[in-house]
Image (cartoon, grey):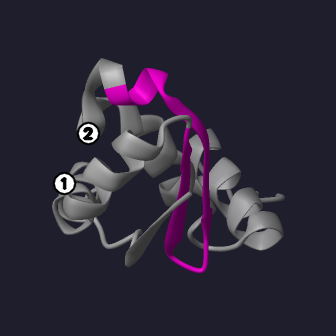
Amino acid sequence: MVYYDVKPLGDLIKEFYEMHKGPDYLDETKAIGLWPKVVGPFIASHTIDLAIKNHVLFVRVDSDALRNELNYSKSLLQKNLNALVGKEVVEEIVLS
């Protein structure tokens, strides 16, 4: 009789991404998806690009004034984003 190691599909997908994209890939993707919830619709609509590399969230916005305002709130944004993800995914935010 042959026995197979049966795993839930969700576990297999997670293992696949961890092997091919790195162990934090799914959490980083979740953090990027939660950005609009953290900053609200106005700031989200002025966000041009988001990327996470080595626990640094890179944020591009389309307004110098907005970038200035966000600079004052970086630590709060980082704290709220990590809280929603449920773990420390973002250690720093870089605005451009």
Q: State the count of labels.
A: 2
Where on the picture, by quarter, is residue 20? bottom right
Q: What's the mark number on residue 67? A: none
Image check: 42 left or right of 24? left
What residue is rendered at 57% in x and 43% in y?
10
- Residue 66 horizontal/vertical position (percent): 36, 41
Identify the secondary structure beneath mark 1. helix
Where on the picture, by quarter, is residue 83? bottom left
By secondary structure, the bulk of the magenta-drawn segment is best described as: strand
* Whether label 1 touches label 2, CB < 8 Å: yes
How far apart in space, not on screen, are marks 1 and 2 (Cα)?
A: 7 Å
Image check: 1 left or right of 58? right
- Residue 80 horizontal/vertical position (percent): 19, 54
What residue is rendered at 46% in x and 21% in y?
45
The amino acid type found where label 2 is placed reads: Val
66 in relation to 21, above or below: above
Task: State which region is magenta.
Answer: 43-61
